Image: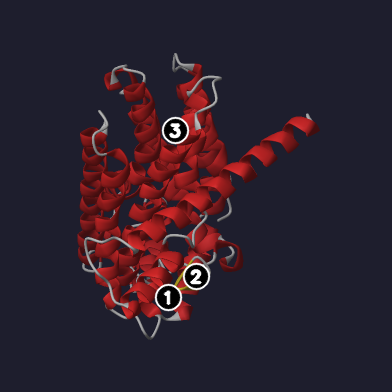
Amino acid sequence: MAAAAQGEASTGATTTATFRRVYETLKAELLRDGYFHFNDDALRWLDAMLDYNVLGGKLNRGLAVVESYKSLKAGSEPSEEEEFLACVLGWGIEWLQAYFLILDDIMDNSQTRRGKPCWYRLPKVGLIAINDGLLLRSQISRIFKRYFYGKPYYVDLLDLFNEVEFKTTSGELLDQITTSEGQKDLSKYTVDVYRRIVEYKTAYYSFYLPVKENVGCALLLSGRNLDDYVQVKHILVEMGVYFQSQDDYLDCFGDPEVMGKVGTDIEDFKCSWLFVQALVRVDERQKDILFENYGKSDPACVAKVKALYKELNLERVFSEYESETYEKLISDIEAQPNEAVQAVLKSFLHKIYRRRK
């Protein structure tokens, strides 16, 4: 068993190293893209911007594409070209993630991201970051055109990214408008409203996109029908809702040193999992405390909200929710007929179950 674990760790390290080498290839190609002649200052800016925003995360979403693709090959090793293209697809998701996060940090007035100042917070950057985010999105199209143009799944690939971007930005709109309305009336923050925001804002690009992308490409490459795996969508969306609920819990109860950022959901009036769970459990006295202190940047007000969450035993409530969600997801995954797809879904779930950052 120890030898098997060592083998898995070694394989994972090899995959990560290969994945990072592909990033350097893609970046070099973008910097020398002849379609637009950047001057030296612009090239230095792009180089630094890409490393800071695209390369700065855990790379879980992108690596999942490569690992899932290998699982779906069902015992046969992918060729060097197939693995390279899987890495390119994975980096497409990382580029999309970086684009979303740059703009999300600006809208949320965030301070830190991944243990360092948000990109727009750097003195030399400021609101130039908005254009940087748009550049990242446009670079995805450049990358995909270079490597996938002419392949039978090229249009489906572009359509998939467009679909996920539309759903994610629509979820962001719901989040922003709901927050604005919540500042006037916190009772509008309900469990149903929370789920609708999370389903679109997080679930689609964090789980549905990586898995559907490489399941879809594997099916397309083998000449099979994408409709065979429509039932997996529900599992992925539920996984995404669980993931965001974890994020909301860690925003309040997580260790900022471990997470790499300081949580601000309470100060930012966010419609979070903790708030909507508190709202269905409070008595009138507790409700008054919650409404009087939520959405205020005063540390004393934040402390009162956190104390109320503890009084309501929301840490225990979340632990129970996490266990129940895990068991339900495992049951749904094991009901899938394809064992390779089961392995992909379980791999995703085990990466996030009881995570601390």
Q: Is residue 122 above or below residue 317?
A: below
Residue 260 appears in the rendering: yes
Residue 59 appears in view? no
Between disc 2 and disc 1, the foreground one is 1
Q: Amino acid at mark 3?
A: Glu
In the image, is 351 to the left or to the right of 154? right
SS under mark 3: helix
The numbered mark at residue 111 is 1
Residue 211 percent across, percent down from the top left: 40, 34
Amino acid at dot 2:
Val
Q: Position of residue 67 (x, y in %)?
A: 52, 35
Cα separation, mark 1 vs mark 3, equals 39 Å
Q: Mark 1 against mark 3, which lies toward the viewer?
A: 3
Name which residue lies at 23% across and 59% down. Answer: 178
Res 82 label: 3
Which quadrant is the N terminus positioned in? top right
Residue shown at the point (47%, 57%) measured from the top left: 24
